[in-house]
């Protein structure tokens, strides 16, 4: 161990000296602009060094991100009160003495927030960015569109916010006869262009990139509800009330691609991320196969089968992104759909095999396997777990995850950009549930993507979280899942 057992994620190397430094002005210490930049002394991106002696704090970083990371570490060293929004600390602020040299293991330390199934108001997203920053996470993948809601204002398309952003209710379970029960209350919301620009700027100030996702050609019932001509049948549908995969899929007309080019032009104007996600997951092809008009279109495009429309959509829109200097990210189904566009990044979610295949064939990948890092999944098999879906994933299970699969040849390791935890929100109808699902497991994930690979003492980790990290989350007002078991009111 490093001697700094309080820290999470653990730094690359550290030495604890006896004693403490009294700090008069903690706010100045936590200002990244006070950290010196020296890319020679600190050679790796995102890296920093701290030297805390009985007389001073010496902080040096490779770059601005490293300076920011240095301040996050200093906040942890100041103690849980440093995470409160106002100074109520009794007595002197103190730092332990010692040396820390640190840098991230991966460049993509991501979290997906699904604001489509249940909307998260802007203030909640800003708070979530603060929580990510405290854990040195640096990519927020915002899942902005799905069958159940569309969350982005796009100039010229008023029905996106008037119609696609709202649904009249949600299935909330099953009756004994198998029929879904319905909550009979409206759900929805959207971000204005100004809101999104604010989210992007707030994230940038915390060295977090916001990767927007517009999911095509499946997961599209909400946008089809607003503009039925985007669908195959042309019929007026509702924004979906159910979960799973809707059968409604985009109509492969040139006008549909034009519509999404316009949406992406707006998305690219708002989001400066070099990577834009086009989804491409779980594409239902039944309507394509059933439609004679689509059959004619398949022939016109020179494709072999309606199934090839999946790759056609992704290629058409990825080409538009590439022409504007952006890279496409897609869920791993885009690998099966056919030739991947140049520079495409694959999000490997149906396990690790797709990620291995993509990396070996020369594509960058982000590892997101549902068996390991889906934080919407249950935290124990206790019947009182408030969100009883998916695989059981405990705090220790998440910490035990290793993003570079054992079967990936060493020559392709550099293709693994990092990993991403997913917070799908079918069962998160308020922000308290997001807290419960995300924490403290997201802290375990943060250590996986930041700290050096190596044998992990899971008991030490779980104990470190309980002793040192939960008090920080308490100070931040995070309603995490307690180690003792589910919260009965969640
Ligand atoms: C699969 S992961 C999905 C999501 C769901 C999730 C629920 C992926 C690309 N698709 O649409 O929300 O499972 O766990």
Image (spheres, grey):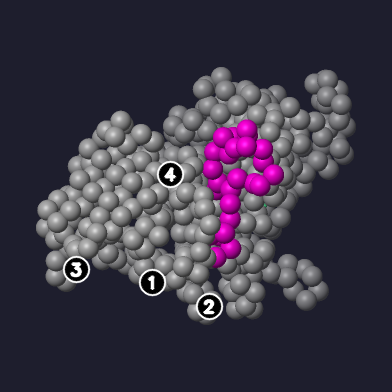
Tag 1: Cα neighbours inside 10 Å, few (<14), some, or many (≥20)? few
Point out the tag, 1 or 4, that comes first from the N-terminus: 4
Q: Which mark is residue 104?
A: 4
Point out the tag, 1 or 2, that comes first from the N-terminus: 1
Q: Which residue is mark 2?
A: 485
* CA separation in Å, label 3 and label 1: 19 Å
Point out the tag, 3 or 1, that comes first from the N-terminus: 3
Q: Which mark is residue 467?
A: 1
Mark 2, secondary structure of its residue: loop
Tag 2: Cα neighbours inside 10 Å, few (<14), some, or many (≥20)? few
Task: Give the residues drawn in magenta, as a range.
Answer: 396-420
Point out the tag, 2 or 4, that comes first from the N-terminus: 4
Q: Going 51% across and 74% down the picture, which residue do you hit?
A: 490
Q: Which mark is residue 212?
A: none
Q: Which residue is mark 3?
A: 89
Percent across and percent down for residue 295 are 86, 29
Mark 1, secondary structure of its residue: helix
Q: Decide if residue 223 is in sight here.
A: no
* CA separation in Å, label 1 and label 2: 16 Å
């Amino acid at each position: 161990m490093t001697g700094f057992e309080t820290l999470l994620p653990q730094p690359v190397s550290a030495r604890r000296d006896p004693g403490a430094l009294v700090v008069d002005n903690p706010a100045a210490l936590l200002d990244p602009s006070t950290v010196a930049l020296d890319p020679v002394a600190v050679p790796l991106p995102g890296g920093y060094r701290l030297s805390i002696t009985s007389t001073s704090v010496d902080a040096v970083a490779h770059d601005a991100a490293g300076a920011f990371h240095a301040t996050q570490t200093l906040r942890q060293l100041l103690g849980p009160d440093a995470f409160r929004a106002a100074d109520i600390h009794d007595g002197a602020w103190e730092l332990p003495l010692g040396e820390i040299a640190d840098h991230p293991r991966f460049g993509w330390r991501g979290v997906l927030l699904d604001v489509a199934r249940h909307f998260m108001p802007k203030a909640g997203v800003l708070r979530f960015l603060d929580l990510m920053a405290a854990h040195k996470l640096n990519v927020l993948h915002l899942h902005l569109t799905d069958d159940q809601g569309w969350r982005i204002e796009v100039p010229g398309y008023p029905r996106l916010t008037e119609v696609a952003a709202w649904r009249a209710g949600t299935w909330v379970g099953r009756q004994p006869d198998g029929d879904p029960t319905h909550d009979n209350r409206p759900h929805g919301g959207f971000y204005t262009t100004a809101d999104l620009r604010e989210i992007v700027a707030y994230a940038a100030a915390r060295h977090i990139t916001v990767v927007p996702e517009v999911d095509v050609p499946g997961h599209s019932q909400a946008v089809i509800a607003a503009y039925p001509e985007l669908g195959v049948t042309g019929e007026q549908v509702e924004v979906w009330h159910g979960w799973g995969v809707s059968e409604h899929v985009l109509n492969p007309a040139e006008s549909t691609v034009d519509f999404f080019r316009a949406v992406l032009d707006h998305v690219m104007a708002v989001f400066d991320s070099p990577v834009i996600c086009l989804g491409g997951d779980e594409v239902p092809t039944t309507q394509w196969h059933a439609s004679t008009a689509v059959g004619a279109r398949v022939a016109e495009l020179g494709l072999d089968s309606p199934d090839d429309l999946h790759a056609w959509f992704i290629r058409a829109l990825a080409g538009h992104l590439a022409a504007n200097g952006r890279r496409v990210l897609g869920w791993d189904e885009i690998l099966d759909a056919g030739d991947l566009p140049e520079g495409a990044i694959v999000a490997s979610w149906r396990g690790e095999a797709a990620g291995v295949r993509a990396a070996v064939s020369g594509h960058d990948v982000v590892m997101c396997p549902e068996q390991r890092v889906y934080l919407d999944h249950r935290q124990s098999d206790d019947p009182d777990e408030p969100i009883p879906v998916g695989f059981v994933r405990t705090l220790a299970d998440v910490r035990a995850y290793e993003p570079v699969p054992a079967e990936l040849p060493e020559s392709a390791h550099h293709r693994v950009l990092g990993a991403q935890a997913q917070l799908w929100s079918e069962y998160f109808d308020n922000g308290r549930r997001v807290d419960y699902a995300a924490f403290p497991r997201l802290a375990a994930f943060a250590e996986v993507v930041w700290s050096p690979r190596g044998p992990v003492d899971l008991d030490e980790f779980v104990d470190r979280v309980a002793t040192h990290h939960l008090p920080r989350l308490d100070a931040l007002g995070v309603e995490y899942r307690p180690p003792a078991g589910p919260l009965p009111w969640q």
